[in-house]
Amino acid sequence: MECNNDKDLSKMPVAYKFKVISDQFAAKLNYRREQDDITFSQMAILIYLSKNTDHDVSLKELSEAVHVKHPTAIGLIKRLEEKGMVLNVVSEVNRKFRVISITDKGKDYLEFTRKRHDDMNKSLLSPLDPTQQQQLSMMLDLILENIDSF
């Protein structure tokens, strides 16, 4: 959904503005993920693995963490393995289990997407001066804290 500049934006309800912003932001992120040939669930796996390097991550733990069924997790890991972003190896401690870990290529991809998100954020906020950016952030925090109250 594209924002129509012919309309008077000041007359749009705030909730509708949030929806338009959310929809457009999600569309841009989804488009970029499609260009990168990676799904939301695959991205969630990479993020989880990057934050859990202090222990061996099992397929069971991973499927629970990203809220997918075991067979779905197997397919996601297989595709990430084919892309060279994760390793899926037999555990040295218990040969019945497999250990999933992120590769350097997976880490590089996450860093690339973090930079891209930072650039998107800067672009989104570029019309605002630093004081306005801080004020907007504080107002959004208040709204988020009270979202359940209505």
Image (spheres, rainbow, N blue to C red):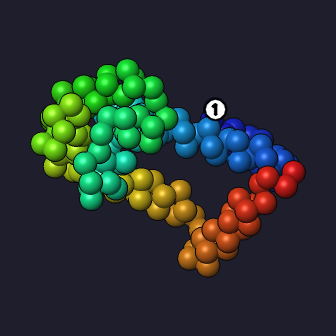
Image x and y of residue 137, in percent: 63, 68
Q: Amino acid at mark 1?
A: Met
> Quick check: 126 above or below 35?
below
Q: Residue at x 32, y 22 (%)?
A: 75
Image x and y of residue 39, in percent: 39, 31
Numbered disc 1: secondary structure:
loop
Q: Nearer the viewer, residue 26 or 50?
A: 50
- Toward the bottom, the furthest residue is 131
Residue 121 visible, this angle: yes
Q: Residue at x 21, y 31 (%)?
A: 96
Displayed quadrant of residue 91: top left
Q: Residue at x 31, y 25 (%)?
A: 74
Displayed quadrant of residue 45: top left
144 to the left or right of 113: right
15 to the left or right of 56: right
Q: How many marks?
A: 1
Q: Residue at x 23, y 45 (%)?
A: 102
Residue 33 visible, this angle: no
Image x and y of residue 16, in percent: 77, 43
Dividing the image into 4 quarters, which one contains the N terminus? Answer: top right
Image x and y of residue 104, in percent: 16, 49
**What residue sits right under mark 1 in the picture?**
1
Callout 1: 10 Å neighbours few (<14), some, many (20+)?
few
132 to the left or right of 87: right
Q: Nearer the viewer, residue 54 or 124?
A: 54
Displayed quadrant of residue 87: top left
> Quick check: 87 above or below 37?
below
